[in-house]
Image (cartoon, rainbow, N blue to C red):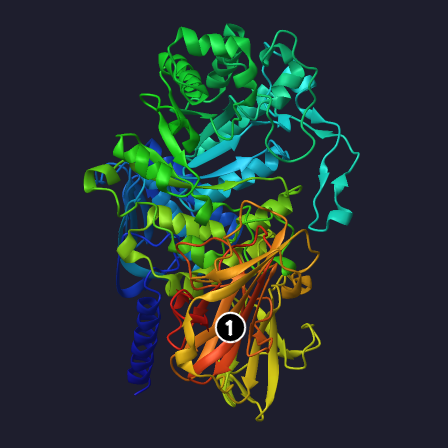
Amino acid sequence: MKIKCLVFLLMLTSLSLYAQQVANKNLGIIPAPASVVINKGVFDLNKTAAIIYDDNEGHTEAQLLHHFLLQSYKLDIPVVNGSRKAGVNVISFSSAGYAGKNPEGYTLTVTASVITISGKGAGLFYGLQSLMQIIDTSQQGIPCAVINDEPRYAYRGIMQDVGYHIFPVDFIKKQIDMMAKYKMNTYHWHLTEDHGWRIEIKKYPRLTSVGAYRAQSPVSNYNNDMSGLDGTPYGGFYTQAQVRDIVKYATERHVTIIPEIELPGHSLAALAAYPELACGDNPGPFKVAENWGIYDDVYCAGKDYTFDFLEDVLTEVMGLFPGKYIHIGGDESPKYKWEKCKYCQKRIKDNHLKDEHELQSYFIRRIEKFVNSKGRDIIGWDEILEGGLAPKATVMSWRGIKGGISAAKQGHDVVMASESHLYFDFIQGPRELEPIAIGVGYNPLPRVYAFNPTPAALTPAEQKHIIGVEAPLWTEHMETPAKVEYMLYPRLFALVEISWTPVDRKDYEDFAENRLPQHLLLLDKAGTVYRVPTPIGQKDTTLWGADFTLTLKAPVENAQIYYNTDGQDVRETDHIYAKPLHIVVPEGEMRQLKTMVIAPSGKRSIVTTTTLVNKAASEPAQINISSLKPGIKYFYISGKLASVDYADSNKVTQKGIATEPDLQKFDSETDHALIYKGYINITSDGVYTFAMPSVGCSVRIDDEQGVRNSNIYNPFDLQSYQYQEKTVSYNLKKGMHKIQIKYIPSDAGNRVRMAGTNGAYESLKDLVFTGK
């Protein structure tokens, strides 16, 4: 009887474990594999097992697994060249047994007694990474399964800028380790900038003795009263010996490093070292840039010496970096100095060029011809399209996807690095709660994950030219490695999934709620800095009603959620979430649920605030609808105002009627304010939310301020709009309601929209009315 009970219990345990494995459909792996089939049973990993291999490639990965198990789990499992012995559980590496065509593909098969990883080169390495992730995240043994996997794109990378701020060699290697662990294969290293030249060039020593150092840097602050220059010299560079070491380190981990040498613009640091490279007869003196921004002084396109210099530089660079691509920048290069330069104008005339845009094309083509002669190809930002694209150039599309579409239609390869979704120097949450960042742009985790690098506007043949995806990390406001990591994680995990996983296998809920918490715990244990996400199941918003039940989940495994409803910021002294929260709001009142996540290491999320409101709906205006006509009155106020609150319709310089509240109506004039007044047609009873720029804008309905969604950003529009927005909510009855919008131009957006009971945002164009 005891034996029967024991067998029954083992069956129940096996069935329970199998159910958990099926629920975890990707076995904890990031990026999600192309195909996973989970079977019953587990492989028992213990010290009696063995690691076997059949060739040198397999031996390398076998040794890596041995080291991983020893360091992480104190398991000293022997590595053996040969076949499996009877009765011994083995993990086998084989390059000969892989039949797939993708050089980065692999097969991982797990049975109760044998784990087999098959692949060649990088593929075998990536199979090992998947196995190690399963070991790290599995709670009860290694599930029996078959994984067939390969990447969606051949190019999967990040761009690390070191021109604005430079980072230690060990930190660069740490980034490469993380990329390799998550199957990223390209490290784009932005080495030169107006603000610093970061790579040793032996033929031109002043590039680093002069160009690598600036006298001071800007003080990063949103408050102009606290901005300025810090008066502290800053700089540094990488020696060629350090570069060779980093390149070797990356190559061993199947990561290719692409160096970027900016030209013809972003070259002020080089001009400070060698002023004769600039336009004119006796240009300069120049100094390495101190303020962030774009500078007019660029390499002279009319002097042959410029090209001699750049060819010398690129020759040394290509001697250090063996990869296919050399990135030549090509972005944000003003033409003003070329327009005034006799040498540049002669070049235009002698080569029958139309204008300075074609002169830039000449510049890029000439550099490309040289790079091609050395057996390499160039890649450049999408400005290299202007004036005509160099014959073999690959385009990195950063200003949205239009440049990538244009290049692909011309038959050129494209890497999508769209600022609208992939710029990781953009904020991830409410600006007032996040570390200081560039003043525009908003790319939270779900927005990154939603990006599809291959535009539907391309034909199937054109889509093949989209070879990959990259997330740039510009470091004007990232002075420390910790700040870089905060901006990189967890968004890197979303990036790797869009770069590797087939579209039909992507699942944001599984990613964010099941797998990501496990991987953030690994970062937490390793001491890596990351942005702790806010609780799953809550967002900064307003909910209307009397009785609420809120179910939350920690976004980091083993983290605690602290909360209160007293309106103060959350502390460790507040309640710890343990079960769904039941909150009752009396009629006519409101409450605020504030939460904060604290990870096992003590790292904290920002505060999330959900406002709970139980107030009666506002009655419509008592007005004869026949007395209204489509449109809305506008009042233009000239001059600079400190706040939108000071905009007064009694001090107008121009007024009229517009078809809609267009915030861009007077965009050409920076110092002004706009006021719109009229009525809005509410078509049914319900809660309505108005989204607007996060600063410099206000909306009032029926002369009421509405309920501000605390620290809100608009999470709904993941594809087409990159600005952070604030929103306010109203409970409105059907009919005409007064509306007033005030606006001062800012970098925070330029539109107002409304979401009705269906949650979809729409323009106000057909909803606003004014008196006849």
Vertical order, 446 against 757 (above or below): above
> At which x and y percent is residue 534?
55, 66
Vertical order, 407 against 502 (above or below): above
Q: Observer-nearest residue: 65 or 171?
A: 171
Which residue has dot 1 on it?
538
Residue in view at x 76 percent, y 30 percent? 233
Specify the quadrant that holds the N terminus: bottom left
The amino acid type found where label 1 is placed reads: Gln
Q: Is residue 68 left or right of residue 694?
A: left
Q: Is residue 117 left or right of residue 640?
A: left
Count of numbered marks: 1
Residue 290 figure quarter? top right
> At which x and y percent is residue 140?
40, 66
> At which x and y percent is residue 355?
43, 19
Q: Observer-nearest residue: 28 or 216?
A: 216
Residue in view at x 27 percent, y 42 percent? 83
Residue in view at x 51 percent, y 73 percent? 538
How packed mark 1 is, by other alpha carbons closer than 10 Å (few <14, some 14-19, many 20 or more), is some
Q: Residue furthest front?
A: 772
Q: Residue furthest bottom?
A: 587
